[in-house]
Amino acid sequence: MGHRPGVARAAHRGRRLVLPLEIGGHTRAITFRRTGDVLHAERFTHCGFVRAQGEHARAVPVVGLLCGELQLRFEDSDPAPTQGPEEASRGPRHAVATGVKMSSGFHFGSIQLYMATALPDFCRLSAHRNTGTGVTLIAKDGDAPAILGDALLSYLVHVRTRHGDSPAGKEWEWVVHAFGGQGPQLAEQLAATVRAWNRHVRDGGGDPALSVYPAGTPDRLLPVGDVVDRPLSRMVFGWPGRDVALHAPVEHGGTLTAAVEGM
């Protein structure tokens, strides 16, 4: 959204527009209806599609860490400075268990979209190649939702907590890993987000309310929600339980703010 001029005009009143969107690197086909100049989502469907090529291609900033072992992908934002996280990733790794568990067959889509829209400084951490260090415990070609601070890096993985002979006997838990001097605080911020998703979203269908406004719409005219700005639009995601901001952004410059209001 925002990379297709005239999307709102293309959705005639009384009709539906089905549009493939990439949000934080995660793809959905969304059915919209139009009210004035605003599009309101009615249904989300998981999908995959080929990105635009040539002159209409959208470049995604990618920054390497640890000589290319890891990559940070900034899908919907400008790349943040990574010198501090690079140095931090060479130090000890902190772990915080979220207490949120899942069984075999769990679909990741809901928590992926929640974190991509609700987390400040969101990016995706991927293991570009294996070097034998195992510094992140992310498998080669796998990725994890992550957030950055100044000399801080935190990301979410799942670890097996129960082994079984059948799928029903297996279980995994979401665990947050973090690097840096204030890594434990940053990890707790990320863990609080996972717990909020578990309380308010997990059993409710997993899809947010979504409204798309024209670019330039003042904040005061937007509904309460998490805003993702695109060149031609402002997408507002309304998640259950997020009537107020869950946490303030990580402050670049050596301090960390982790207000978890309304959890």
Image (cartoon, rainbow, N blue to C red):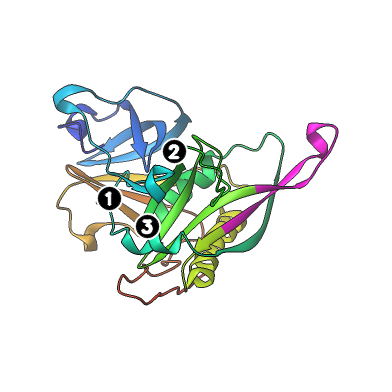
Mark 2, mark 3: which one is toward the viewer? 2
Residue nearest the observer in this picture, 231 or 75: 75
The residue carrying mark 2 is 128
Q: Which residue is mark 3?
A: 225
Residue 137's spot in the image, x, y percent? 58, 48
Crowd tier of the residue under label 3, counting other residues whose Cα lies within 10 Å: few below 14, some 14–19, many 20 or above: many
Q: Position of residue 200 (x, y in %)?
A: 57, 56
The residues tagged by marks 2 and 1 sit, at their Cα atoms, a distance apart of 21 Å
Left/right of residue 140 with respect to residue 245 in the rendered view: right
The residue sitting at 20% across, 34% down in the picture is 3
Asked where in the image residue 214 lies, by quadrant, the reply is top left
Q: Which residue sits at x=34%, y=22%?
A: 50
Q: Nearer the viewer, residue 79 or 200?
A: 79
Residue 143, relative to residue 250: is it above or below? Answer: above
Position of 155 with respect to 170 (left or right) is left
Label 1 sits on residue = 77
120 in relation to 20, above or below? below
Point out the stretch of residues depicted in magenta: 159-176
Give the alpha-carbon distance from disc 2 to disc 3, as whole Å.
34 Å
Q: Amino acid at mark 1?
A: Ser
Screen quadrant of the N terminus: top left
Q: Badge 1: few (under 14), some or many (20 or more) residues near its Cα, within 10 Å? A: some
Q: Is residue 193 magenta?
A: no
Q: Are marks 2 and 3 in contact (CB under 8 Å)?
A: no
Q: Amino acid at mark 2?
A: His
Q: Quadrant of residue 255?
A: bottom left
